[in-house]
Amino acid sequence: MPDRASVDDVLQRTGMTSLMYYPEIHVDEPDYTVDDDVSWCLEPLTDLTPEQRQSLREAVGLVITNPTAHRFAFFQELLSLAPADE
């Protein structure tokens, strides 16, 4: 189970990345991929199961590209990984 600091770091990275994303970013930065941003956002979480990692990758990708529609589900999923007593 990830520690609280790692979960907080993922939340901060995802928030920052979603603020910097815009639909036309591929025009301005041809090498940009959402997948690279997702990987960077999840770097702090090293002890996830493959199923947890895949589910969270999908949630992070969705919240980067459309934060308003997906932030609540992402937030709940991420917090479910955090230890309750820290």
Image (tube, rainbow, N blue to C red):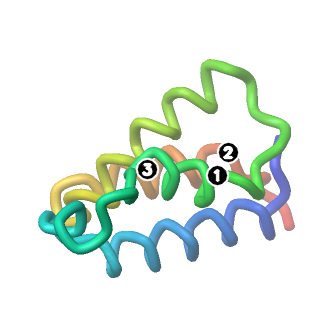
- Disc 2 element: loop
Q: Nearer the viewer, residue 76 or 27?
A: 27
Q: Nearer the viewer, residue 79 or 25?
A: 25
In which quadrant of the rendered image does the N terminus lie?
top right
Marks 1 and 2 sit apart, C-alpha to C-alpha, by: 13 Å
Q: Which residue is mark 1?
A: 42
Instruction: Where is residue 55? Give x, y as percent.
Output: 49, 30
| Disc 2 + disc 3, Cβ < 8 Å | no
Q: Is residue 49 above or below residue 62?
A: above
| Disc 3 + disc 1, Cβ < 8 Å | yes
Residue at 32% across, 56% down: 63
Marks 3 and 1 sit apart, C-alpha to C-alpha, by: 8 Å
Q: Nearer the viewer, residue 21 or 71?
A: 21
Instruction: Where is residue 78? Give x, y as percent.
Output: 56, 51
Label whose residue precedes the other's in the sequence (1 or 2): 1
Q: Which residue is mark 3?
A: 60
Q: Which residue is mark 2?
A: 81
Amino acid carrying label 3: it is: Val
Residue at 54% across, 27% down: 54
- Disc 3 element: helix
Task: Single out the residue that lies furthest toward the top.
Answer: 51
Tell me: 12 left or right of 48.
left
Q: Quadrant of residue 47?
A: top right
Label whose residue precedes the other's in the sequence (2 or 3): 3
Residue at 86% across, 67% down: 86
Q: Is residue 67 above or below residue 33?
A: below
